[in-house]
Image (tube, grey):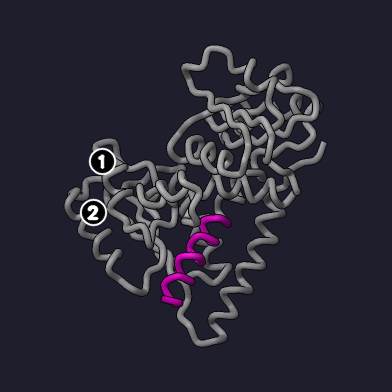
Amino acid sequence: MIILDGKQIALKRKTKLAQKISEYQNKGFRKPKLIVIMVGNDPASEVYVSHKIKIANQVGIQSELLRFESNIKKEDLYNKINELNQNSNIDGILLQLPLPIDFVEEDYLQAIIPQKDVDGFHYINQGKMLQGYETIYPCTPLGIINLLEEYKISVKNKDITLIGTSNIVGKPLGMMLLNKQATVTLCNKNTLDIKKHTLAADIIISATGQKFIITEDMIKQNAVVIDVGIIRDLTNNKLVGDVDFESVSKKASYITPVPGGVGPMTVITLMENTFSLYEKHINN
């Protein structure tokens, strides 16, 4: 069994990205710029955002956090996004989710123009992704594909079972794998027999946020297992995932740990997406 070390791969990619950004600086170009918008004070979001900004600064991306109270007027948030859209010195805009409950998240995600949509959630970027065109892809799905490629795990002709069909991970990842010639099964909360599908899979990717939903009896020998879930186990205060790592790792050929697997790949992919948008802006 080999651990898919997302932390180590992200570190390698971080060094490479910092070098690319430094080369542009040496030629007299401005730094890439990422704006993170946060509404309210969700505790998990606080942690994620501070980590994203820290990594951005380390690779040479100028990052700025715009905080708004949860009672901000909806129109004011729209106007702020529109103002950022029109600022030619800003390359990427990230709207940290979740928004307060009375906001329709999709409305604000779509307010960010495709050219600054660092998360790859705009309908135009999603449409290009669906049809297999080059675009900005959502960070977690692309991070997973990059992690598999770093370990030379091909998805072509493989049977892949994906558990969890969110717009952020499951659906886009399913389409991206399909475009890479994989055979993809998508399971959701209404799937009657998830085990039937996981047992048939060469690669299992679980993104539900439910502790230990994937157990040893659900995978075949030498399957590749990707755990996207991250849950705090209240019994011991440790972070765990969808996969019962202790038992599943005995049968898997490759497996991601939690933490240190998919999470670091998501963050470095966000930085790489920011850089891709930056390159388009300064070269146009």
Sequence-earlier tag: 1 or 2: 2
- Total marks drawn? 2
**Quick one: quadrant of the N terminus?**
top right
Q: Which residue does the image show at 72% across and 52% down from the upper left?
A: 150
The magenta stretch spans which residues? 268-284
Does 167 sit above or below residue 53? above
Res. 181 image quadrant = top right
Disc 1: which residue: 103
Question: Is residue 14 shown left or right of residue 33?
Answer: right
Disc 2: CA contacts within 10 A as few (<14), some (14-19) or many (>=20)? some
Q: Tag on residue 245?
A: none
Instruction: Estimate the x, y position of residue 86 in percent, counting from the top left.
Output: 27, 68
Magenta residue check for 281: yes
Q: Amino acid at mark 1?
A: Phe
Question: Is residue 229 shown left or right of residue 9?
Answer: left
**Quick one: quadrant of the C terminus?**
bottom left
Q: Amino acid at mark 2?
A: Leu
Q: Nearer the viewer, residue 135 or 139?
A: 135
Q: Are marks 1 and 2 in contact (CB under 8 Å)?
A: yes
Instruction: Estimate the x, y position of residue 45 in percent, counting from the top left.
Output: 44, 46
Res. 248 image quadrant = top right
Q: Nearer the viewer, residue 243 or 28?
A: 28
Disc 2: which residue: 77
Magenta residue check for 127: no
Instruction: Estimate the x, y position of residue 2 in percent, counting from the top left.
Output: 80, 40
Does 104 sit above or below residue 276? above
